[in-house]
Image (spheres, rainbow, N blue to C red):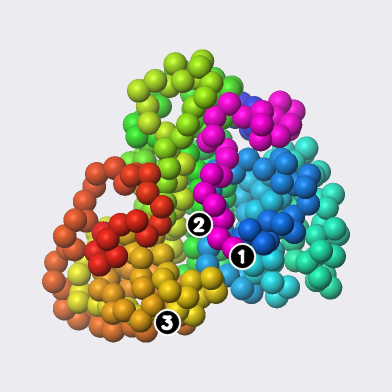
């Protein structure tokens, strides 16, 4: 099976809307926060009707940011992000399915007028995300790269992750949602066109994903949230019986100095409550729900993620790396998925 051709066929011809999906892998079930809900209301109906994402890929504190959207589809995420980055920022969408790109580009002027911008801050480009080096994209040119339920569809996932690392600015972030499995999907299922189109046959085992992310230069992948997938189609359920699938959102920072484990240097941060939409608490990931004004102990990696990224102005920092106290308790290697939303874990623990 040619994965790129199957994706073009499945998302360009077979699916005519989200109601045609046989699982909820390519559906976002979480209720969006108010700012995202308002932004979605200003997205064209045709764009929203052909949306097939599995998570909310709109990280906080992105005003003025330059964003690359991998597998942008009909453009819903790109048009939402365009409102969040504002007219000083920009969003570039890359997709390989002509039918989806046609919908996205058809409404460029409509969205510019709806947003009240003098110029469009969105553009779309045809391209295969497995071959980003063949596109005219600026190396180290993006503050944030996003992707929504697309990496599972490509064969060479390592090539995508390596290109993302190259295209991000230092301190930049890959914030993305995708489908993962609690074990490796058997080879016999990987070439089923329906399982592929439904985002199951190409789902990475979570341990393999973490390995590939680290090979690409992302030393400490952080899980933001996850949910178990529902499979309503009887044939698909029988084929994948025994495999647990999860829609998960991760954030990967391009930062020097990140360590393989969460090491304790006696550091702490204090959140100022200044990120729009997060006045009382900022959720860095599923294990770091940082309340405003509270002194929050963190590992060295978390300290670097906050201090070395666009998030730094919103925190006060204490401590350095001069004394090491060992690894934080509970920094283990078991499956990260629990079906929990951000902030569900104990706020006082590092991991």
Image location of residue 277, percent across then percent down: 53, 70
Question: Mark 2 — residue?
Answer: 175
Image location of residue 98, percent across then percent down: 77, 39
Is disc 2 placed on a helix, strand or loop? strand
Residue 21 within the segment the image draws in magenta:
yes
Q: Residue at (37%, 49%) from the top-left corner?
A: 340
* Image position of 115 with respect to 246: above or below: below
Please rate how many residues cluster around mark 1, counting C-alpha atoms within 10 Å: few if below 14, some from 14 to 19, many from 20: few
Image location of residue 249, percent across then percent down: 46, 50
Dominant secondary structure (helix, strand or loop) of the stretch shown in magenta: loop
Q: Earlier in the sequence, mark 1 or mark 2?
A: 1
Q: Earlier in the sequence, mark 2 or mark 3?
A: 2
Look at discs 3 and 1 and give the one toward the viewer. Answer: 1
Is disc 1 placed on a helix, strand or loop? helix
Question: Mark 3 — residue?
Answer: 272
Cα separation between marks 3 and 1: 20 Å
Q: Quadrant of residue 95?
A: top right
Q: Residue at (33%, 41%) from the top-left corner?
A: 207
Please rate how many residues cluster around mark 2, counting C-alpha atoms within 10 Å: few if below 14, some from 14 to 19, many from 20: many
Cα separation between marks 2 and 3: 23 Å
* Image position of 206 with respect to 16: above or below: below
Closest to the observer, 256 or 228: 228
Question: Mark 1 — residue?
Answer: 35
Q: Quadrant of residue 38?
A: bottom right
Residue 338 visible in image: yes
Closest to the observer, 155 or 116: 116
Q: Which residues are magenta?
A: 12-34
Q: Quadrant of residue 57?
A: bottom right
């Amino acid at each position: 099976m040619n994965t790129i051709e199957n994706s073009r066929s499945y998302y360009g011809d077979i699916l005519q809307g989200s109601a045609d999906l046989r699982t909820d892998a390519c559906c976002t079930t979480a209720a969006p926060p108010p700012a995202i809900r308002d932004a979605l209301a200003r997205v064209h109906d045709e764009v929203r009707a052909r949306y097939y994402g599995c998570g909310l890929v709109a990280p906080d504190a992105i005003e003025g940011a330059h964003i690359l959207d991998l597998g942008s589809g009909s453009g819903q995420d790109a048009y939402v992000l365009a409102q969040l980055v504002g007219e000083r920022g920009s969003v570039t969408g890359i997709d390989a399915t002509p039918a989806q790109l046609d919908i996205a580009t058809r409404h460029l002027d409509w969205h510019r007028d709806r947003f009240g911008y003098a110029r469009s801050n969105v553009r779309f480009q045809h391209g295969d995300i497995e071959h980003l080096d063949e596109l005219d994209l600026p190396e180290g040119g993006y503050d944030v790269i996003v992707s929504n339920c697309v990496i599972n569809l490509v064969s060479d996932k390592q090539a995508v992750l390596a290109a993302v690392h190259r295209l991000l600015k230092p301190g930049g972030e890959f914030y993305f949602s995708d489908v993962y499995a609690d074990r490796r999907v058997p080879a016999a299922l990987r070439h089923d066109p329906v399982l592929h189109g439904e985002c199951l046959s190409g789902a990475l085992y979570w341990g393999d994903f973490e390995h590939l992310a680290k090979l690409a230069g992302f030393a400490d992948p952080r899980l933001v949230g996850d949910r178990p997938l529902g499979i309503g189609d009887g044939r698909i359920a029988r084929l994948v019986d025994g495999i647990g699938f999860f829609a998960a959102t991760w954030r990967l920072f391009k930062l020097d100095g990140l360590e393989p484990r969460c090491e304790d240097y006696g550091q702490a941060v204090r959140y100022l409550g200044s990120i729009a939409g997060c006045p009382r608490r900022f959720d860095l990931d599923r294990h770091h729900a940082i309340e405003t004004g509270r002194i929050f102990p963190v590992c060295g990696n978390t300290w670097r993620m906050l201090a070395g990224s666009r998030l730094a102005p919103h925190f006060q920092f204490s401590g350095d790396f001069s004394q090491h106290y060992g690894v934080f308790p509970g920094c283990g290697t078991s499956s990260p998925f629990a079906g929990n939303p951000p902030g569900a874990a104990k706020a006082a623990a590092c991991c």
